[in-house]
């Protein structure tokens, strides 16, 4: 399928339809939109930025408590830039997609170095920061600084794809270009309307034009929505045939010393769970005791394996085999180091932990109670 041409002209529809779009969405927003989100603070691009990064792939209700804790600990760019990446990751623990936190931290350091600690207000400079794409840059500058920029996050993409019946997978460049063109066309011309309009579009996608079962009857756009007229809102945006996610397997080596402490090590900065702390890992084909001998030059003795866990990533599912092993004090002392630490499962300290690691530590802590 290709892109269905806009109803008329290159801007996505006749001028009165476009004007109606903006007016209808803004009117709906005044009555039904979300006006009291904690990051809706005019003139504070830092807060909007943090919220926009957290909201990527994550729902508002999940984000709010994380956002509030994060802002209490890192109230401004400079505090964030000066914090250790470990501390930043620890405040992200449970939110997932940790590259977002690492990029946020890197970007804060760039802002401190290159912009004197002041969040830039020029589109190109914002876009140049790590972890910020065109839509996020537009959201930050429109919501915080009343600049006129369109946005195209997942919610807005869905509304526009349906309203204009844009057929074709949204990963395609031509489809993205068509959607950006529509996003620009429907954005009201007045700068001061960009913030409420963009917020309204995000809310409309999240609350009314939902992924499944959109509530067209209460939608302010129902009068001119092409997907509604076709009777097939669910068919837009076009979903690709996603192949089933493959499964990868790994053994987590849970080394335990006589005090009941376990060994965690910091993972490399890149790759999955980059920079977070976790249990040492070996492949399923290896015998854990032999692996410890080879990797750490210590003798460990086996205990019963813990139940298998599954953790979903975007592209695969990780099947985890947690294997506890006991080591002596002397052996434990041999392998402690800068990026390896023995700690009590109930007291991991301020360290970034991926969800399964956190879950296993909680289980181990309960076992020792
Ligand atoms: S009418 Fe239905 S499909 Fe169209 S924009 Fe509104 S909720 Fe979405």
Image (tube, rainbow, N blue to C red):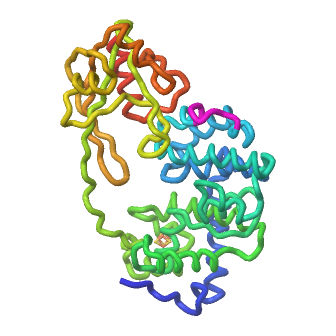
Horizontal side of residue 332 vs 112, given as left or right: left
Q: Is residue 360 left or right of residue 171?
A: left
Residue drawn at (54%, 66%) of the image = 156
Give the magenta-colored segment's residue range. Answer: 82-88
Q: Is residue 218 magenta?
A: no
Does residue 158 appear to the left or right of 81 in the view shown?
A: left
Q: Quadrant of residue 350?
A: top right
Q: Nearer the viewer, residue 119 or 161?
A: 119
Measured as percent of width and height from the top left, residue 360 is found at: 35, 26
Q: Judge left or right: residue 26 versus residue 240.
A: right
Give the residue at the far bottom of this rendering: 9
In the rendered image, which quarter contains the C terminus?
Answer: top left
Query: What residue do we see at 27% from left, 18% from top?
Result: 325
Determine which quarter of the picture holds residue 345: top left
Q: How many marks?
A: 0
* x, y percent for residue 288: 23, 26
Q: Position of residue 367 (x, y in %)?
A: 32, 14
Q: Quadrant of the N terminus?
A: bottom left
290 over 109 or under it: above or below: above
Above or below, 359 relative to 285: above
Residue 369 visible here = no
Residue at the image point whose x is 46% and y is 39% from the top: 268
Foreground: 213 or 270? 270
Residue 205: x and y in percent read 52, 63
Q: Examine the rendering and report whether any part of residue 4 can be seen.
A: yes
Which residue is at 29% across, 43% downward?
318
Q: Which SS does the magenta portion mostly show?
A: helix
Query: On the image, which quarter does residue 272 sit in?
Result: top left
């Amino acid at each position: 399928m290709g892109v269905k041409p806009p109803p008329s002209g290159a801007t996505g529809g006749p001028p009165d339809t476009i004007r109606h779009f903006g007016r209808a969405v803004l009117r709906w927003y005044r009555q039904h939109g979300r006006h009291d989100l904690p990051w809706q603070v005019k003139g504070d691009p830092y807060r909007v930025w943090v919220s926009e990064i957290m909201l990527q792939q994550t729902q508002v209700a999940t984000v709010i408590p994380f956002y509030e804790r994060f802002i209490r600990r890192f109230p401004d760019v400079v505090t964030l830039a000066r914090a250790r990446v470990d501390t930043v990751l620890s405040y992200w623990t449970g939110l997932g997609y940790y590259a977002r936190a690492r990029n946020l931290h890197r970007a804060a350091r760039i802002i401190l170095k290159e912009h004197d600690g002041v969040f830039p207000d020029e589109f190109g400079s914002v876009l140049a920061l790590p972890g910020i794409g065109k839509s996020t840059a537009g959201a930050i500058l429109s919501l915080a600084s009343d600049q006129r920029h369109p946005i195209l996050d997942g919610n807005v993409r869905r509304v526009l794809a349906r309203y204009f019946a844009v057929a074709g997978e949204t990963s395609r460049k031509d489809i993205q270009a068509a959607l950006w063109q529509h996003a620009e066309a429907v954005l009201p011309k007045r700068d001061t309307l960009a913030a409420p309009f963009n917020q309204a579009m995000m809310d409309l996608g999240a609350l009314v034009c939902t992924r499944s079962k959109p509530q067209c009857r209460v939608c302010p756009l129902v009068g001119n929505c092409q997907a509604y007229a076709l009777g097939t809102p669910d068919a837009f945006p076009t979903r690709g045939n996603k192949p089933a996610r493959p499964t990868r397997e790994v053994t987590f080596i849970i080394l335990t010393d006589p005090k009941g402490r376990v060994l965690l090590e910091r993972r490399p900065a890149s790759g999955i769970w980059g920079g977070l702390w976790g249990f040492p890992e070996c492949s399923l084909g290896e015998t854990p005791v032999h692996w410890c001998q080879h990797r750490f030059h210590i003798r460990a003795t086996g205990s019963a394996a813990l139940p298998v866990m599954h953790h979903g990533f975007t592209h695969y599912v990780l099947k985890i085999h947690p294997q506890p092993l006991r080591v002596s004090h002397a052996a434990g002392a041999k392998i402690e180091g800068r990026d390896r630490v023995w700690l009590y499962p109930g007291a991991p300290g301020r360290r970034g932990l991926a969800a399964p690691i956190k879950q296993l530590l909680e289980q181990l802590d309960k076992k020792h109670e």
